Amino acid sequence: MSDLAIFGGPKAVTLPAGNMFDWPIITKEDEDACLEVLRRGGMSGTDVTTKFEEEFAAWNGTKYALGFSTGTASLQAAMYGAGVRTGDEIICPDVTYWASGLQAFSLGATVVFANVDPDTLCIDPNDIERCIGPRTKAIMCVHYLGHPCDMDPIMEIAKKHGLKVIEDVSHAQGGLYKGRKLGTIGDVAAMSLMSGKSLAIGEAGILVTDNREIYEHAMALGHYEHFTAKAITCPDLAPYVGLPFGGYKYRMHQLSSAVGRVQLKYYDERCVEIRKAMNYFWDLLEGVPGLRAHRVDESTGSNMAGWYAAKGLYRPEELGGLSVTRFCEAVAAEGAPASPGCNLALHTHPLFQTADVYGVGKPTRIAYADRDVRELDKALQPAVDIGKHTYNIPWFKHYVPEIIEQYAEAYKKCALNYKELLADDKGDPEVLGGFHFFRHTK
C-alpha cells in the first residue's frame, strides 16, 4: 500500500491545530476599547482615530498617517495624492488584488499592467520601463503576500522618469526591505487593515507619507472633517476647504481605530512569532524537489512582516511535470490546507478590456487615454501562468514545532512520492486562482 493518504495511507497531520490559525488575537483589552467608544456614543467621531493615526505614524516612521474606511479608499487617496488625474496612467502588477489599481478608473485614469517576478511574486522591475508612456504618473508597488518588492531598482526607474512611487502595504504591514520599513520608501503608501490582514483592526485602511502635499491632497479627497483651513497649507486647496473633493466620506470607524490602538501595541511581537513559525516550516522543506519557499533572506535586513496569506512556489519540472492541482489534492488528503493558484492576472477580466463603466461610449480603460494600453497586455503571459506555480501553505500564528512538523511532512511526503501521483494526473485547469483569492477565515 502507498504511504500517501490519497491512496489509503496514514495522514501526515494528526494532531489538532488548536489556536494555530486563529487570527486576529482579540483580548479583553480590545473589547474594553470598543465598549468605551460604544458607551459614550463616539462611533462616528474622530478623537480615537486621531490618536491611532498619531501612534501609527510614529510606529511606521512617517510624518503623517490618515485613517480610512477601507484599504481600497486609502489606495485611491494615495493615487490622488500622488497627482493621478484624468488621462494619466499608473503601472500596477498584473497579479494582485483588484484594489491595487482599479480605483484609477474613478479618477479618470487608467492602469498599465506589468509582469510579476516568478520568485518574489511582486512587480518585476525589469518589466516596468516597457510600460511607461507620456502620461505615466506613478508606479504601484504591491508587497504581495508579505514579500517586499525589490524597491532599489524601482526607485531608480521612478527617479529616472520622474514618477511617483505608491506602496501597497496591505499584505505586509511592518515588514522590512533592507532594514527600511515598508511604506517609508516610496512617495506614499496605503494599506488595508481589514479583519483578515496581518494587522487586523476591522474594516479599515490607512495612508502614510512624509510628503505634506500628498497628505493634504489625500485628505481633501474624502475627509471633510480634516479638510479645514487650519490643516491646509497647499495654496491650490485653500479656496475649497470644508467639502471633500471627491464627494467621499472616508473616515475610519472608531471601533476599528479603538481596536487598532490595542493591536498595534502587540503587533510586532506577534509577527516575530509568526515569522519564527513560518521560517521553521520552510526550513523543514529546504531541498525538497519541486518546492521553493516564498520568503526573503532575513540576513539582508528584510522580512515578511506577518506573512499574510502564505504561499509556496511550485516547480513542476522537478516532479516529472506533476500538476500543482494534483499535488495539492494529495497534500489536502494528508490533512494540510492546500489549493493551487493565486490572484488571477487582472488584465484578463473583461472589466479591463471592454466594460464602459461610466457610459462614455468606449471601454473605461481607454476612455481618456492617449494610447490603447490594452495592446501592452500581449506581453503578460508570464503573469497569466503564475497560478500554475503557486499553492497555499498553512499560515501559522504560533511557534509549536510538533504541529508545524506534521504540516511540513504532508508537503514533503507528496513531493517525494510524486511518481505515484503522475499516473492519474489530469493536469491543471485553464484557470487557477481567482480575482478574490484570499482566505479571511481560520
Image: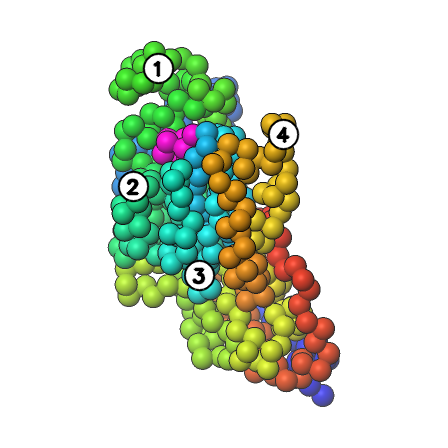
Give the alpha-carbon distance from disc 2 to disc 4, as whole Å: 32 Å
Q: Is 254 on the left or on the right of 385, as rendered?
A: left
CB contact under 8 Å: marks 3 and 2: no
Q: Given this view, does label 4 or label 1 mark the residue nearer the observer?
A: 4
Give the alpha-carbon distance from disc 4 to disc 3, as whole Å: 36 Å
Q: Given this view, does label 3 or label 2 mark the residue nearer the observer?
A: 2
Which one is earlier in the sequence, the residue at label 1 or at label 3? 3
The amino acid sitting under disc 2 is Gly
Which one is earlier in the sequence, the residue at label 2 or at label 1? 2
Query: In the rendered image, is residue 54 in sight?
Result: no
Residue at image mark 1? 228
Q: Which residues are magenta?
A: 77-85
The amino acid sitting under disc 3 is Asp
Residue at image mark 3? 117
Helix, strand or loop at label 3? It is loop
Which one is earlier in the sequence, the residue at label 4 or at label 3? 3
Helix, strand or loop at label 2? It is loop
Residue at image mark 4? 361
Q: How is the image coloured?
A: rainbow
Q: Given this view, does label 2 or label 4 mark the residue nearer the observer?
A: 4
Q: Which quadrant holds residue 414? A: bottom right
Q: Residue at x 41, y 53 (%)?
A: 130
Which one is earlier in the sequence, the residue at label 4 or at label 1? 1
Helix, strand or loop at label 4? It is loop
Q: Residue at x 32, y 63 (%)?
A: 298
Q: Is residue 81 magenta?
A: yes
Give the alpha-carbon distance from disc 3 to disc 2, as whole Å: 23 Å
Helix, strand or loop at label 1? It is loop
